[in-house]
Amino acid sequence: MVLKLYAVSDGPPSLSVRQALAALDIPFELKDTNFGAGEHMAEEYAKMNPQKEIPVLDDDGFYLSESNAILQYLCDKYQPQSELYPKDPKARAIVNHRLCFNLSTYYANISAYTMAPIFFDYQRTDLGLKKVHIALDVFETYLQRLGTKYAAANQLTIADFQLINSTMTLEAIDFDFSKYQKKYRRNCSINLHSWYITW
Ligand SMILES: N[C@@H](CCC(=O)N[C@@H](CS)C(=O)NCC(=O)O)C(=O)O
């Protein structure tokens, strides 16, 4: 049975999974989930994901949420040789680290500033902006220390999907990136463009 992905258009975690599916060349059925209409709050949806969050992957009745877990599962099950999720323990640990960093800090700090005020009753505050800069400074440090072309390696990995989509939400509000190096965002944009347009 073909994989089903419950996704919301423009939601960074949903976009990451769609980019990975396209990059790994895995056929899937897109189940467009209407966030505005609260489709993810329905009882039926909660049976797939009690957290009531989007995305959810349905692999023939095996339901998986949390986009990091979905990305890892797709690589492990469908393209185990893919360099998007390297096998070497250290290389994989760096990818896993960047995925955790995105979930705990980078996306958390950025989305609270960029997305929460659009969808919920939150304000953009100086403290929120400070937290965005903390996240960007730490990410910049990781990029400089590792010295690779992408966030976790010299090739694109699943961590880049998450990190670049978090960053993209700042671009959407015309955030001033002049303090930060452009190289990483430029490298990712070139690579991701072809996958964006295949959707
Ligand atoms: N940690 C989750 C976060 C997913 C997430 O935040 N999804 C948003 C849409 S972009 C959502 O479903 N939010 C529901 C809500 O806040 O009620 C993941 O990575 O999959």
Image (cartoon, rainbow, N blue to C red):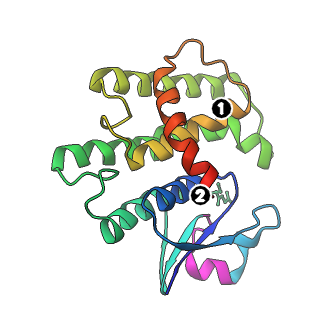
| Residue 150, percent from left and from top | 38, 33
Residue 170 is tagged as: 1
**Which residue is nearer to you in this view: 156 or 143?**
156
Q: Is residue 86 left or right of residue 135?
A: left
Q: Is residue 172 above or below residue 20?
A: above
Residue type, mark 1 in image: Leu
Q: Is the C terminus in the top left, top right, bottom left or bottom right quadrant?
A: bottom right
Q: Is residue 12 left or right of residue 116?
A: left
Is residue 12 something one can see in this rendering?
A: no
Between marks 2 and 1, how big is the CA–CA gap? Answer: 17 Å
Residue type, mark 2 in image: Ser
Q: Is residue 190 above or below residue 17?
A: above
Which residues lie in the magenta part? 44-54
Query: Measuring 60% from the left and 18% from the top, which residue is drawn there?
Result: 177
Label 2 or label 1, whichever comes before in sequence order? 2
Q: Is mark 2 within 8 Å of ligand 1?
A: yes
Is residue 112 something one can see in this rendering?
A: yes
Query: Measuring 66% from the left and 18% from the top, which residue is drawn there?
Result: 176
Query: Measuring 47% from the left and 22% from the top, which residue is drawn there?
Result: 183
Residue at the farthest left position: 89
Residue 54 is tagged as: none
Callout 2: SS: helix
Residue 14 is tagged as: 2
